[in-house]
Image (cartoon, rainbow, N blue to C red):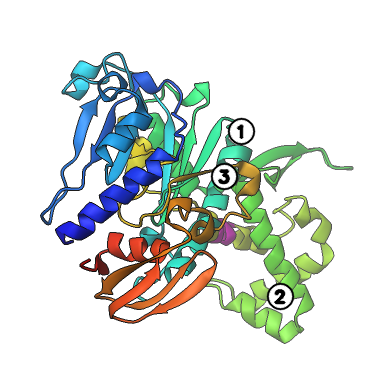
Amino acid sequence: MEERTRAYLRGRFRDHYRRTEITLPPAANEREWGYIPWTGGPGTTMVRHRSLLELGDVGDFLERERPRHVYFSAGRYRDPGAGSMSEKEWQSSDLVFDLDADHLPGVTLGEDSYAEMLATCKDALLRLLDFLEDDFAFSDLEVVFSGGRGYHVHVRDESVQHLDREHRREIVDYVRGIGLDFEQLIETETVAGLGRKTPTERRILETDGGWGRRTQHHFTAFLDELLEAPEDEALSRLQSFDGIGEGKANATLNAARNNREGIEAGNVTVHTAVAQLAERFAKRAVERDNAPIDEPVTTDTNRLIRLPGSLHGGSALETVRIDRHEIDAFDPLVDAVPETFVGHEIAVSVSRGGEVELGGDIFTVPEGDQSLPEYVATFLMARGRAEKEKE
């Protein structure tokens, strides 16, 4: 990035902060703060181990320093400005989740557009929230568009504040479905059947919530497809599973027809073949429903995370808090475009053109000198695809 481009972005970031009111995280004075300035050269320099007392008023700090990126810690400390983690004296930490489109299954880098990557990431976000709200019953959640390629979720329930890394790792394993054992999803109940001297046991797949509910959803949907298909097609699909031959396929299909209500209730003992097939769908549930979070972020009690309301120096988009009820309607390529950059054009020299979807429009940007809406131009400059044209 050339110096005039860096100076321009730095100045416009200042203009943004002059007109933006930043809402601080809870206990902001107990957190470590850090930022990356607009420095020259190929690398970046992180300034960290700062307390809020050292920064002063955050709004004044942002206007004065105009940082490229700004962060605060998930952790809360007795002395957040101390130069080493041990000297800070850790007290507690939010539970933070990071979803980055670059690392998601289903995203093909170099082929998927930025908009497509973000749409895939939102789907992953909704799956993550299903775990956090339904399985863990967390209620104090803050959802944030990172300003780059994904989303952050901050959990601030009191129950998570003092969890160590190992316990946070258990939460990671759960939402990722790591090590999921089908037997853990099964409840065994004793049934005293009529005319039986010895009670029998019935195995029931838990369907009220958790991975049992997810497994049941995929399993019964598959059975419904089988029952709607011609018999020869249904049997062929069943025999496509390893270990299921013609006999087991016929038995499974008959059990699905004659015991649909029991299977819907989670009874996987209607036939051995049904139980074996249901177990396979626990793996399918993990493949399709897990939340592909950036695991080290969640286990790290000292992690620095991007400040909502700040600008992302790699996109010139805003890091936006999203109301829980507005996630479906949230469009990052519209709602994260800073108002400061809307309403006028600037001249830039584009080195890497292509389609840019921003502000509700799609721009086909050629290479070379040209005038573009400023929010498009700042996006391209921040991404290293354009330079500010000489005045």
Where is residue 67? Give x, y as percent.
27, 42
Query: Sequence order check: which comes first, mark 3 or mark 1?
Result: 3
For label 1, the residue is 137
Residue sitting nearer the eye, 374 or 316: 374
Where is residue 43? Give x, y as percent.
13, 52
Residue 317: say if magenta.
no
Label 2 vs label 1: CA separation?
41 Å
Task: Write the start and end of the magenta stretch as one range.
Answer: 279-285
Q: Is residue 364 left or right of residue 388?
A: right
Q: Residues within 10 Å of mark 1 (few under 14, many from 20)?
A: few
Q: Is residue 320 above or below residue 223?
A: above
Disc number lying in front (3 or 2):
3
At 49% from the left and 74% from the top, the residue drawn is: 362
For label 3, the residue is 129
Where is residue 280? Give x, y as percent.
56, 61
Q: How many marks?
A: 3
